């Protein structure tokens, strides 16, 4: 009787351990995906900042070009 109870308890424990292993593997997979997404997010934020800086510089160049054209038109 005690042996049967011990064997049943061991089966339950083994099943719980197997389930825990599956959950831990799933968690590891999710963590890897999260880390990858976080890295991609940082890359996109950096690219966004670069684009914003380029737009500011392009705007300054455009304003400078328009100013030059207006000055050139007034001189001639």
Image (tube, rainbow, N blue to C red):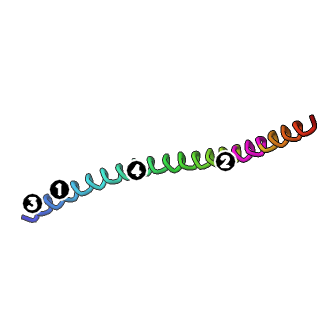
Marks 1/4: CA–CA distance: 29 Å
Task: Find the magenta span and give its range.
Answer: 55-62
Q: Is label 2 in a helix, a strand or a loop?
A: helix
| In the image, residue 13 above or below residue 74 | below
Q: Residue 30 carries which label?
A: 4
Q: Name the residue under label 2.
A: 52
Q: Mark 3 points at which residue?
A: 4
Query: Quadrant location of the C terminus?
Result: top right
Q: Where is residue 29 in the image (x, y as percent from the top left)?
A: 39, 47
Q: Is label 3 in a helix, a strand or a loop?
A: helix
| In the image, residue 20 above or below residue 56 | below
* Residue 10 placement: quadrant: bottom left
Mark 3 or mark 1: whose residue is earlier in sequence = 3
Name the residue at 78% across, 41% down: 61
- Residue 32 colored magenta? no
Name the residue at 17% across, 56% down: 11
Of 26 and 42, the residue lying toward us: 42
Mark 1 or mark 2: whose residue is earlier in sequence = 1
């Amino acid at each position: 009787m005690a042996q049967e109870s011990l064997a049943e308890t061991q089966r339950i424990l083994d099943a719980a351990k197997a389930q825990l292993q599956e959950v831990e593997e799933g968690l590891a997979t999710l963590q890897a995906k999260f880390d990858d997404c976080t890295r991609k997010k940082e890359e996109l934020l950096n690219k966004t900042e670069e684009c914003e800086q380029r737009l500011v510089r392009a705007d300054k160049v455009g304003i400078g070009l328009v100013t030059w054209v207006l000055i050139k038109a007034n001189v001639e």
